[in-house]
Amino acid sequence: MSRLLLKNGLLYTPEGVISGYLAVEGRAITYVGNPRPAGDFDSEKDLSGKLVLPGLVNGHTHTAMTLLRGVGSDLPLQSWLFDRVFPVEARLTAEDIAAGTALALLEMIGCGTTSFTDMYFHPQVAAELVAKSGMKANLCYPVQAFDPGETYEKNLSARALEALWRDCHGMAEGRVLVDGCIHAEYTCNDDVAAGVAAFAKEKGLHMHVHLSETDSEHRQCLARHGCTPAAWMEGRGVFDVPCSAAHCVWVTPEDRAIFRRRGVTVIHNPSSNMKLGSGFAPVPELLAEGVNVALGTDGAASNNNLDMMEELHLAAILHKGRRHDAAVVPCNPAIAMATRAGAVAQGRADCGVLAPGMRADLMAIDLDRPHLTPCLDAPALVTYSAQSADVCLTMADGKILYENGEFLTLDREKILFEARAAARRIYG
Amino acid sequence: MSRLLLKNGLLYTPEGVISGYLAVEGRAITYVGNPRPAGDFDSEKDLSGKLVLPGLVNGHTHTAMTLLRGVGSDLPLQSWLFDRVFPVEARLTAEDIAAGTALALLEMIGCGTTSFTDMYFHPQVAAELVAKSGMKANLCYPVQAFDPGETYEKNLSARALEALWRDCHGMAEGRVLVDGCIHAEYTCNDDVAAGVAAFAKEKGLHMHVHLSETDSEHRQCLARHGCTPAAWMEGRGVFDVPCSAAHCVWVTPEDRAIFRRRGVTVIHNPSSNMKLGSGFAPVPELLAEGVNVALGTDGAASNNNLDMMEELHLAAILHKGRRHDAAVVPCNPAIAMATRAGAVAQGRADCGVLAPGMRADLMAIDLDRPHLTPCLDAPALVTYSAQSADVCLTMADGKILYENGEFLTLDREKILFEARAAARRIYG
């Protein structure tokens, strides 16, 4: 088992930021602190002037939508989705999705992201790319049922999800996991939702859903079912397993109580919720009530990037502005939302913290930048001053995926070339 | 006069994004478009895969506060200001301010900013550095009068502003201008404000002020004067010259009508207004009413960087979220806020647009990045996907200040070293 010593870096640990040593053996962190750990190492890396943090976890995205980056900008949500996005998605082939997903992995690795939760079509394609890239991902197929009478047994998207589970759950030494999924309340019926929930429970999977993204979605559910999307999901058994629910912009205090009681993680997507005009999720309220809140980028069509440093920044400042209170969502809880909370949501309890026994999923920020000078408060620099281009090292399961502009598992030029070729195929 | 040809770049022009040529002769743009312009050039620069835009204009900052980056993070506004910021500012020497200002210029030039409006102490120090750096700046000294009976003639800060005007207005071939300034309504009295306004009018200067940043400032003014800060300023003659007013978070519809009638520019500072819990300025309303709205970073103590690409992004998404309307503040008006509107606010009518006859103030973004691929909509990429590290070229008055990581007018390593030394002096 290879032994690597990271030395002289600033380390973002649960006990605070320290200057010290971090040892990696195989896939795990075996030592964090001072003095220098005993024994010989196969290699040593000097991280002077670098700040090492847990890898970022993107809790909600649609990776292949990188090929729709900038499509329908500044249009109202319904027009963006129905007139611009859906017609393009209907034309996407498995080859396109491979090109768009590879582009997404390249972007995410370069931004310090080590794991992500993905909801999209042809997820087996994503699984292969994730395995090759060295990243981690929880993948799911968006189960939808527009016919109110359709049963779980007859639903084709449910079959696609089951096939994904058979093909990919646990592959690449557990770096790839499969989640149960219903796309959303407004795109599913009772029987199919309950069937997916039962499947997830039987197989021991987590669930991933969209929930109360827009006001109209929330109100239409009340009209249709007489309850909120959160209450409807709970009634279908969706929360009988650990579930991560994306958006949660329009949730009520009662919905938040359901999340807390049932251990639901809220995935906050501030860029996407703003850009599409959806609104602002009640994050300070959720945090105060003890709900696990993680961060996501959503797809690049509504963001328009996969930059978790940007989401961290937005999550920390947006709610201060909304609540007129500079003390809500401080730096350290915001960093936890971007790291540990996402790992917990994915069922990866051994990820998201720099501590012995945890997986070596980490990233480093180069502090030798004008906008990161002087370094008076490292967590504040990460949260408020840094940008993703400051990331100089990304490691997952002890393997370096990115360092100082070089991608070690992916061919940057080939991926950019193929993404541009796919865009020409799609848009002519 | 030197002749430079920029070729093969995508050019962000008033007529849209074109692929073509941009010629620079001396300080001015002399040609934009196709075909290749006639004549010989002293040098040619290939900008294939680059997007060229007008230089960014930072409409409101306090440059030397880079040395307070991260001080008092996550504290309520009053505690941040009185317990943490003011005690540090009281200790700053001219040497410290030189170090902090140089750091700010380095950061801004690397982010594509070509001009800024600065309100701080020892502004002659900033003027010298601006002259050396090749940037442009409108500088002012914050006039304050806490004694209600103090007259303009007796006020020392008014003398400092007059001295700044004598020493620096028009220096460096007009790259340095001096604005009249009162710090804010709540830090000034009637006579001093009226005196500064009369001085600005006599000398033909623009004015720069803070206005209605917080709810309490706005309400206390109503209690004190029976009118809003905007109405009080108008009554003192502050708007008799072109004025740029920073923040304007809590302005009323009547205040907005004053701005429109009197040609006041609103400087929107979204990061700072969120981070300090001040709130959200009514930007879509101001734009709809025809008010000139520009962007600023505010000081690095409340941002915590001087990154205009970030402000552009926030200005474009924040109000969509607040108004639940994805169509407000579209890309092109947002880019105009970050460029042309700021130039107009500074009284630099020949800046902020890529067109013949305008000053050659520009920056280029390197599109060869995963998060800028594919390039389906260049203005959307700039607004929603780019980060300031994508800037690969900054030029002001025809002179290249920054290119591909190299600073041509400033010594990066020396400035970072001196900023860290200043921080050690200040914080021990």
Image (cartoon, coloured by chain):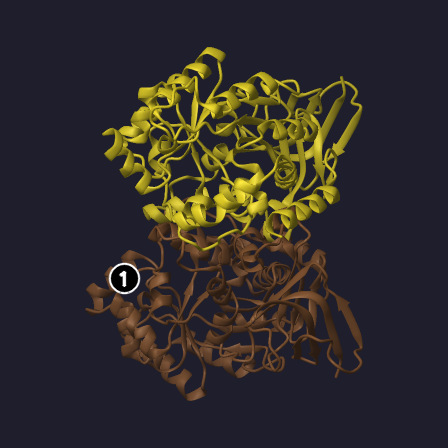
Chain colours: A brown, B yellow
Q: Crowding near pointer 1: few (<14 within 10 Å), some, many (20+)? A: many
Residue A140 to residue A85: above or below: below
Q: Quadrant of the N terminus of chain B?
A: top right
Q: Quadrant of residue A151?
A: bottom left
Counting from the top left corner in percent of width and height, residue B318 is at 41, 46
Coordinates of residue A299 in the picture (x, y in percent) = 49, 59
- Closest to the observer: A79 or B283? B283
Residue at 37% x, 71% y is A291
Residue under circle 1?
A218
As rendered, which of A158 and B298 lies closer to the eye? B298
| Vertical arrangement, residue B169 with respect to residue A5, above or below | above
Query: At numbered mark 1, what does the secondary structure look like: helix, strand or loop?
Result: helix
Residue drawn at (47%, 71%), measured in percent from left and top?
A341
Q: Nearer the viewer, residue A93 or A349?
A: A349
B415 with respect to A74 (left or right): right
Q: Is residue B345 above or below residue A252?
A: above
The residue sitting at the top extreme is: B202
Asked whether, in this view, residue A106 is left or right of residue B349, the answer is: right
Number of numbered discs on residues: 1
Query: Given the image, on which type of amino acid does mark 1 rest?
Result: His
Which quarter of the figure has residue A45?
Answer: bottom right
Q: Is residue B352 visible?
A: no
Is A26 rendered above or below residue B375?
below
Residue A374 placement (x, y as % from top left): 63, 50
